[in-house]
Image: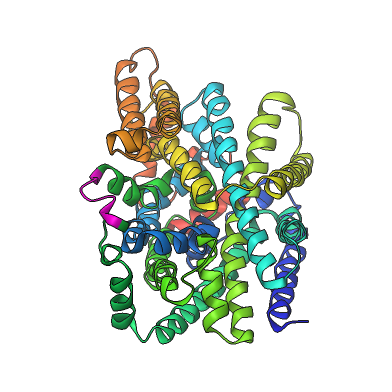
Amino acid sequence: MKIELVFLVVYFLAMAGIGVWVMRRSSAGAEEYLLGGRSLGPGVTALRLQSSSMSGYMFMGAGSLGYSQGYFGMWYALGDLGGGVLNLSVLGRRMRKLSQILGSITSIEYLEHRYPSKWTRAIAAPIALFCIFFYVLAQFIAGGRGLEMVSGVSYPVALAVAIGVIVLYTFLGGYLAVAYTDFVQAIIMLIGMMWILIGTLNAVGGFTAGNKGIGEIDPTMLTMWGKGLAFEGQWGIILGALLIFSIGYMGWPHVVVSHMAMKRPSVARRAGAYSLLFNLAFIPGPYLVGMFALLLVPTLANKEMAVFAVAEAVLPSFAVGIVMAAIMAAIMSTADALLLQAGTIASQDLYARFVNRKMNDGQMVWVSRIIVLLLAVIGYVIAAFDPPAVAEIVIFSTTVLGSAFVPAYICAVWWKKANTVGAISSMLAGTVTAVGWEIAGMAADTGLDPMVVGIVCSTVAMMVGSLATQTSSPVPEAIARALDETAKLGPIPTSLMLGQDQTLAAQAEIAGRSQ
């Protein structure tokens, strides 16, 4: 067996082992399975949030952008650098506190509790499920392609193995397995990316020499306007690139659920610092490696394989195994979070809410597991027979998620006048605008990115819808009191614990000492 495969087998077994290790605890009930019992500290919270949001895009999409557009890809990187700390600073503490007060255990249920109406969940859940399914499909494709390249087996077989490992530990361990594996995978991602970046710079003669070589091929690649200056002056497109991985993060249900799972609200402060340090060390790497791949593998047939190809070209076999584990870690850390979130939305936010409201916690856990398995099978069929480009799927799905949910999540904790009508209007406006803009190809015609247009429309809809209906659809008094308490730094009064169990109620009082 090749040394690269040995590393991957050990890595796969370790991830599956974590799922088995936490299985008993995660089977205790819905809150344990979906939020890990709200028990995560700053390190796990930060790295789980970052690794689950980066995905296979960082090793395939980012490398592809660097290979095809040079330094233009750095606009995405600049937005991404502060995405985690912005998310944790704006939403982290307040969302953790409000979700506990309202008794919410899923990020979509949280929206219904904050904007009370069955229509809030009936609209939010299908939008989120649609986008998340396509996002996880991109991770399946990336995992299959990567494993195919390093193992030599056919793509359908490699895809089945990659999906099988992801499903196994997600199926068994729920959120706690996802969080712990994401923490480990983030560390592997960082080590692998640093290794391949150092190897790449060494192979091209250093950063300055590498840039000189790129300039000799095409000097426009050294600008941030793209190959041939294709995006020069197109600030609407550039603003979209900056927003998608910065503000856009705050609309991704599988990411913001990290705030709800924190041990206490004050965890957000340290988690934000850890998140920023991780991003500074990791994010520029894939874009630079992709660009310098033009010097090392200039005739690459599939530009999305740039990082993979460079790893094989510049690193020894044992190091390639570690780097491949890092690449698979990036893919799996997002895929597991997406799968769990999709299963949660389908089981908890749709089936249990609208079909079988008498379902107990144990049944809910098993329904979620079955849906995870079903989504994996459907995803395999699509990915195996007609796989689209990873970068395109990721950018489309994350654009729609951000456009639909960013105002709803931000206003939920920062604007007391935000009401149900405003939230529903915002989600519909953001979704329709972003999808329509993308399908109609309006970005090329107008120079405005779908993310920019989508967030603007959803924000305006939130403001207009809320302000116009303050009399007919007022924010309930209980919600207003909860928001007042959310803004404070002290412990949550027991009288405001509307839906939590006694363990968490006690935890809230203890946690107040460190807030």
Q: Is residue 40 left or right of residue 156?
A: left
- Along the horizontal axis of the image, is 148 left or right of 103? right
Q: Residue at x 50, y 68 (%)?
A: 299
Which quadrant of the figure contains the C terminus? bottom left
How many labels, in total? Answer: 0
Indicate whether residue 230 is drawn in magenta.
yes
| Quarter of the rendering containing residue 319 | bottom right
Q: Nearer the viewer, residue 147 or 498?
A: 147
On screen, residue 498 above or below 44? above
**In this view of the protein, can residue 263 be seen by the observer?**
no
28 versus 177 height, above or below: above
Q: Position of residue 86 (x, y in %)?
A: 35, 54
Task: Residue lying at the far left in this picture: please name it.
Answer: 233
Q: Specify whether 170 is left or right of 41.
A: right
Which residues fall within the magenta stretch? 228-235
Q: Position of residue 488 (x, y in %)?
A: 34, 47
**Residue at x 35%, y 27% (from the top left corner):** 462
Residue 302: x, y in percent? 54, 60
Residue 18 or residue 267, whichever sits in front:
18
Q: Is residue 370 left or right of residue 245?
A: right
Which secondary structure dominates the residues rendered in magenta?
loop
